[in-house]
Amino acid sequence: MSHPIKHFKVITKHRHVVIKHCFKAGIFWQGLRHDLSKYSPTEFIPGMKYFAGTHSPNETERSLHGYSLAWIHHKGRNKHHFEYWTDYNPKSKVVEPVPMPINYVAEMFCDRVAAGKIYNGDKYTDQSPIEYFQRGKGRRIIHPETSDLLESLLTMLAEKGEEETFKHLRQLVKESKLTKSK
C-alpha cells in the first residue's frame, strides 16, 4: 500500500532534524542541501511504495528485489554516505573505499543521529546511534580512518552527550577548513 503523505512527512521531519544538527556542527549550508534527492521520483516513488515508518523503505525494496534502485540513486548523489567514497585503486585495480572529508563525516554523523531519533522515537537515547553502528560494523566497506572517526564521534555522543559532541565536531570542521585554505 502506497503512503505518499506519511513518507513525505518522515523524510521531511528527518531532514529538518539533520539541518538543526548540521547547524550545531558548523555545516549549515550542507544541512540545507541534505537529502534533497529523496524528493526526486527515483527515490520518492519507491519510498512511498515501501514505506513502513520504522525503517528505511530501501530495506524493503532490497529484500523484495535483491537491490534498491532508490538507494543506488541516493548514495551516488549524497556525499555524506560512505558508500559514495569508493574509487579504483590505481595499484590494485580494485574498487576500494577512500577517506571521507571531515565535513561529510560531520554530515554523516548528523544524519545517523537524526535517523536514530526519527526511527526510534521515544525509545531513542544517545546510545542508539553507536549501538546501530556496532551492529553493522563487520559488514561495512568503509575506509578505516572514516570508520574510526565516525565511531569515535558516536562513542563521544553516548558518553558525553550532544552538547559536547557537537562542540567537538564544530572544532574538527573548523580545523579542516583551515587546513584546506593553507
Image (spheres, helix red, strand yellow):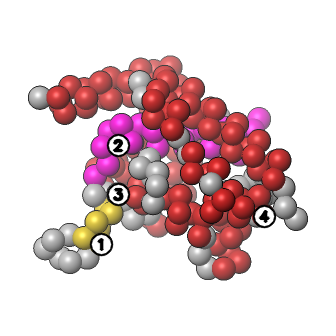
Q: Quadrant of residue 151?
A: top left
> Which residue is the site of mark 4?
49
Q: Residue furthest right?
A: 1
Q: Give the mark, 4 or 1, whose residue is nearer the N terminus.
A: 4
Expressed as whole percent of the image width and height from the top left, the position of residue 66 reads 61, 79
Residue at horizontal 82%, vertical 48%? 6
Q: Report how far apart the C-alphas of labels 4 and 1 lie in the structure.
A: 32 Å
Q: Secondary structure at mark 4?
A: helix
Q: Nearer the viewer, mark 2 or mark 1?
A: 1
Of the image marks 2 and 4, the number of the one nearer the N terminus: 4
Residue type at the position of mark 4: Lys
Label 3 vs 1, first from the N-terminus: 3
Q: Which mark is residue 95?
A: 1
Q: Is residue 159 above or below residue 74?
A: above
Label 3 residue SS: loop
In the image, residue 129 above or below residue 173: below
Q: Residue at x 44, y 47 (%)?
A: 80
Provide the residue designation for mark 2: 149
- Between marks 4 and 1 in the image, the one whose residue lies nearer the viewer: 4
